[in-house]
Image: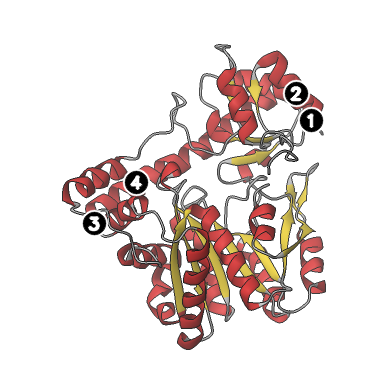
Amino acid sequence: MFEKLETLPPDPILGVAVAFREDRSPDKVDLSIGVYKDRSGVTPVMRAVQKAERALIEAQDTKVYLPPSGAPGFRESIFSLVMGDGAAGLRSRAAVIQAPGGCGALRLGAELIHRAAPAARVLMSDPTWPNHGPLLSGGGLQAGQHRYFDALAHRLTLQPMLDALEAAAPGTVVLLQASCHNPTGVEPDQAQWHQILDVVASRRLVPYFDIAYQGLGDDLDFDAWPVREAARRIPEILVALSCSKNFGLYRERTGALVVIGEDAGRVKAVESQANRAARSMYSMPPGHGGLIVERILTDPTLEADWRAELATMAARLRSLRELLAAAITASRPGFDASWLTRQRGMFSLLGISADAVRQLREAHHIYMGLDSRINVAGLNEDNVERVARLVAPHLAG
């Protein structure tokens, strides 16, 4: 059966992480895989997560399956976190389905869209996270891209994006990263978001938000603003959300798909179809991570501690951007690296060549993707000057 299968090359992101682990150099720096790290290079378990997990283990008396849509308390609390003050007014026409991480939510949404419109097309930014295409096309959607980023100027190319949306047929799905764009770190400001949503509404497009970094850009409310504004203005939206980054629940695979429809009747059909699609892929969602999130978001003390630690993490990412920009300028006087400080979240696309990326890896043990995406959290106060000195000569401009 398997004799014709060929060995595939390593995943472009995960393969770099494997190479990093095998490197024995004491000077190695991992700027590849997208996980938050503290100064010591460790991805910590958040304080509130530790407390919630201990309480959960002490109180649990069963490992029975969750309902197909997931833990009710998780679904309600995560919907309120994403939708904020408008959650109560939207809940009657919203379906919330717990999923195995943000990836599971993205794929589940694609499956749902394909059931409703088998010929549906999705537009994604160019560039985007490499797994967006496989997840959405694997669910049956025809994938296309629109220009998003000027690599030389390190800025959003808004007009080409708007032109592509204007040219899209009604019913086209538009994948929008709500905040902390992966891989560029460049996101629209609120005025630009208004322009984007104007076109989406007028062309009767369907926005599909990926919100994987809520709270790691500016704050929980600001990062979710585009989703909330779209829900206010547009009758049908989809949202794939992840708890991997902002709760640090990477291996617990905790996420959800939110679908807001025009009325409660349509949402009942959506939820039944999503549950059927989930049944055919993974049957029931994993419980542990969702129950941790539920406990945190329903306990005022735990939630306050979680919010405080998340704000500290976001502030550290902003500080590392400032350190890197200053260190690049110190290494290359006259070079303007301020674009690093205007970006948000964990990622930045440096815009250096694949050959330079290989040289940095082989000669200096600095690891990043071949597209030169870096995870800013892989930097720290001890390695940032060395990284800046070695990267600076390769930067365009």
In three-dimensional space, the C-alpha distance between marks 2 and 1, rounded to whole angstroms, equals 6 Å
Labels 3 & 4 near each other (Cβ < 8 A): no
Rendering quarter of residue 158: bottom right
Disc nearer the start of the sequence (3/2): 3
Rendering quarter of residue 312: top left
In three-dimensional space, the C-alpha distance between marks 3 and 2, rounded to whole angstroms, equals 48 Å
In three-dimensional space, the C-alpha distance between marks 2 and 4, rounded to whole angstroms, equals 39 Å
Give the residue pinned by disc 2: 358
Give the residue pinned by disc 3: 299
Rendering quarter of residue 295: bottom left
Give the residue pinned by disc 1: 354
Disc nearer the start of the sequence (3/4): 3
Q: Is residue 279 visible from the viewing direction of this image?
A: yes
Q: Nearer the viewer, mark 2 or mark 4?
A: 2
Q: Quadrant of the C terminus?
A: top right
Q: Amino acid at mark 4?
A: Ala
Q: Which mark is residue 211?
A: none
> Which coloring applies here?
secondary structure
Q: Amino acid at mark 3?
A: Asp
Mark 3 closeness class: few <14, some 14–19, many ≥20 residues within 10 Å: few
Q: Amino acid at mark 1?
A: Ala
Q: Position of residue 197 (x, y in %)?
A: 65, 72
User: Secondary structure beneath disc 4?
Assistant: helix
Q: Which mark is residue 308?
A: 4
Disc nearer the start of the sequence (2/4): 4
**For the point 75% across and 30% down, which residue is it?**
335
Seen in the picture, residue 249 relative to 40 is either above or below; the reply is below
